[in-house]
Amino acid sequence: MSLINLKILFSVSISLIFLGCAKNSLVYEEIPVEMLYSCIDYDKVVDPNFDSDDLYAFWDIFVADAKCSMSSSPDYDKLNTDVNIFYEYESDALFASGEVLDYGAYAASSCNDSVVRVGIAFRYWNDINIWQKLGLMYHEFGHDVLKYGHSLNPDDIMHASSPFASSYNGFIESKNRFFEKKFDGLRYLDCSWYEDYSDGTNVPNHPSMLHDCNKDHN
Ligand SMILES: [Zn+2]
């Protein structure tokens, strides 16, 4: 074999080695991540046309999800006739002092079965991704609609501090436990004080009325 032929053979061999490596890494990167099943199709929330500033869109998703995920198939849109979801902003004075709201959101009508009242800290809302937004909304509806208290597991939607899971699968795993009522330390809010007010129209400023939900500063 001539020297030239040897050189060609050598360079072809080197090329094959590189091709082999490139192919292997390509195959490795293409291993698909299994998308967990949900009875709700979340494609629309990752669509560029989805308006994540429309807080009522999250109520609609929650209602549809509860209906197909919970064994009792509740109609929360019919049960809750008065739904009010709104942003909260820093006061000028607070903002001027360099401070921001110290909560991510709150639920203000947990014990009234026909009213949903949820406040969302606008600045915080804009800092979190779509799966964390869904987790935060489900958390507040957990207080306001399902009367859930806080849990101790940071992976649960009902943990006292957000942000919650930042990925699709993380959100699906925690919201499945949430709807199946299978999460650590599940407990319900005490609404016995509220039931003393028979018509629900004259509710005092009871400390159990507001559920401020912390954001994690770490
Ligand atoms: Zn909370």
Image (spheres, helix red, strand yellow):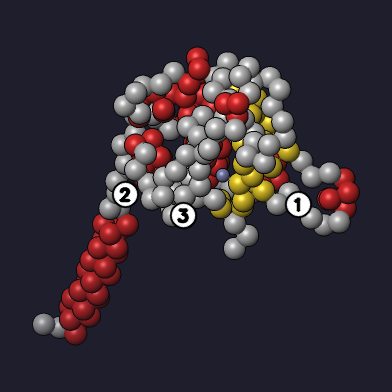
Q: Quadrant of the N terminus?
A: bottom left
Rendered location of residue 53, percent (x, y): 64, 33
How many circles with numbers are drawn on the protein?
Answer: 3
Of pointers 3 and 2, the one earlier in the residue sequence: 2
Q: Which mark is residue 152?
A: 3
In what quadrant of the picture does the C terminus appear? bottom right
Identified by mark 2, the residue type is Val
Disc assigned to residue 100? 1
Q: Do labels 3 and 2 touch, CB within 8 Å?
A: no
Mark 1 to mark 2 CA distance (whole Å): 37 Å
Depth-wise, is mark 1 or mark 2 nearer the camera? 1
Q: Work out whether mark 1 precedes mark 2 in sequence or the reverse, and give the earlier one.
A: 2
The residue carrying pointer 1 sits among few (fewer than 14), some (14 to 19) or many (20 or more) residues within 10 Å by Cα, namely: some
Q: Quadrant of ligand 1?
A: top right
In this view, the residue in front, 195 or 116, is: 195
Residue, disc 2 = 33
